[in-house]
Every structure is written in structure tokens, then in C-alpha cells.
Image (tube, rainbow, N blue to C red):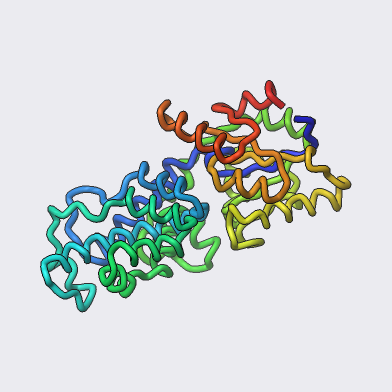
Amino acid sequence: MDLRALIWDIDGVLVYVGDSYRKAIVETTQYYFTEIVGLKLSDYLLSVEDTQKFKMAGGFNNDWEITYGSVLCLLTGIISEIDSRNKEVNSLRDLPMLWNESHTGLDLDHVLRRTAAMGGGLANLRSALAELYGRSEETAEKFWHTGLIKQLFQEIYLGQDLFREKYGFNPEHIKKKGFIRNEKPLAGQKLLNRLSEKYIMGIASGREHFEIDVVLKMHGFREFFNEGFIVGSDDFPSGKPDPSQLIECRKRIEIVEGLLGGDDIAYIGDVPDDVIAARRAGFHFIGVTASIRDDSGKKRLRERLIASGADLVVDRLAELEEFI
């Protein structure tokens, strides 16, 4: 590939988010069911591995929406178990009294396979749950408060200081150090410096600008990316596979650097939706499996990225210099 510009995703590409965003999904879901619903739980309802299943179903590039989906799935599973005993749920307070903790919940893999077949994303997840669980899903939606879920997520992910800085008020539920502090770089500063000397560097991310700026400064990446070439979800709320962020990033680069041909630009991402967005934008695509810790998971992701149309897949970002 004879490239002039590299556009980067952040999560799973520039930084490892298994102990931050992914953990925030798990902890937010758990908090919702223990503190809001009031269940006495002896184990976690969701795992970090489960969050990857949402990503692979497609349409879940926004981690808030994965959390919304996780909560709705689990609510539906709990209410389905109660419905199977011909008990009626009239209020949130009924759930702890009626739920049988030995019930393992719904078949998440089955639900997400159906969601993927319908096109992926939160809207199709709701349709899949309604199709598979009928009235139980309808009841679950009455106790599914996405505004509260988002606030809980942000309090857990950002922590007290950054939450207050971003939103202008103190956290109301969780007052601890934010999981954003757990993020580790997947790219080295020396590598990014060498690449930035050779290529125009931009970002198209599902994060909002506030969080993009925090993570770039935290890891010393800020100097390698022109502020004008950074596009976040507060620029275009429709996430990948919608190519709008990538197209906007290209337009901004062209205003400063001149026109880019189809062979001049590549997007670097880590999930099949990233490949689709790149193709729709007319970009090359470079896949990264660096955020997956186990070999079998890397192999599965590599196969999915190649099947989706990736031009190149690397396990470590250091390999980029060799191949491009």
C-alpha cells in the first residue's frame, strides 16, 4: 500500500481498554442489578468476554449501547424466568422477591446471533429479544432506564474528578478512581513519532472529544495527531459501520493537505464494523488484534477481519512499519 494518510481508531488500537471501557460495562451492569434493581448476587452477571460478543455481533461500537443492551438482555432473562412460573412483575421492587437466583438467565449467544442476522446494533437487539422472549422483553423495557445506565457508566469510567470536569456536577452514585486510569498504550511513542513523520495522522473514534483528549494526553500521543484531523462521536453520533466519521476526517485533511486518492488513505481498527466503515468511505483497512490476549481469540478476530475485507491484519502495531 502506497499510503499518504493513516486514520486511527483508539479503543483496542492505540490503547487497551479491557480494564477500562470493557470493565466499566461489566461493573455498570452489575451495579444496576445490585443497587438499582436490588438483587443479592453471588457472582457477576456479565463477563468481559461477553462484551466482545456484542462487538462481534456488529453495530455496537458505542460502549454505552453495549451496556444498555447487556442490562436489557439480563432484565429480559430474569423476567422470562419469573414469567415461566406464572408470576407477575408489576414494579422494580418485585424483581428481588420473585427471581430465582439459580436461574442462569437467557442464552446470550443465541440472542446475539439472532441480532447479528438482523443487522446488529441496539435496535435489532431489542427486536431479537422481542421475537425470542415476547412479553418478557416488553416488561423488561419498563425497568430499563438508559439515562441512568449512561450516568452510572460515566461515573465508573471517568471517576470523580473527570466526571465533574466533563459534566459540571459531582457523581451521584460512584465516587471512586475512574477506570480510564487503567488504560494501557498498545502503540509506542517512538513508533507513532516515526509514522507521523511519514504519514498524515488522523483519528475517527466512538469516543467524544473530551475523552479522546484525555487519553491522548495521558499516553503522550497528543503531538502525533493534528487537532483538526480528530473526529469523535460528538461530531457524528452515528457510529461505525456508518462511514460519516471517516469521510469527515478525510475532508478535513484534504482542506489542509490536498486531495487524497482511494489508495492514499487507510483506517486502522479492530472490529468488523471498522472494516465495513472503511470500505464504505473508500479507504484501505488495516486490522489490529493487539487487544485480544489469548491466541484463539486473536485467530477468530483475524479471520473475521479478513472475511470482512481487511487489506492487512497485524497482531502488534510495530508490524505496521514492515508491511506499509
- Vertical side of 217 occupied by 145: above or below: below
Residue 242 image offset from top left, x and y in percent: 62, 56
Residue 249 image offset from top left, x and y in percent: 73, 51
Residue 294 image offset from top left, x and y in percent: 40, 28
Question: Residue shown at 79%/30% (left/top)?
Answer: 2
110 left or right of 304? left
87 left or right of 26? left
Question: Residue shown at 44%/45% (left/top)?
Answer: 20
Q: Quadrant of residue 166?
A: bottom right
Question: Residue shown at 44%/62% (left/top)?
Answer: 124
Residue 8 image offset from top left, x and y in percent: 65, 42
Quadrant occupied by the C terminus: top right
Question: Residue shown at 21%/64% (left/top)?
Answer: 80
Quadrant occupied by the N terminus: top right
Q: Which of 168 and 153 is in front in this view?
A: 153
- Vertical side of 323 occupied by 10: above or below: below
Q: Quadrant of residue 264?
A: top right
Q: Quadrant of residue 5?
A: top right
Q: Nearer the viewer, residue 51 or 221?
A: 51
**Residue that protrudes farthest toward the bottom in the picture:** 90
Kindly tell me whether residue 159 is visible in this rendering: no
143 left or right of 69? left
- Vertical side of 102 occupied by 236: above or below: below
- Vertical side of 27 occupied by 323: above or below: above
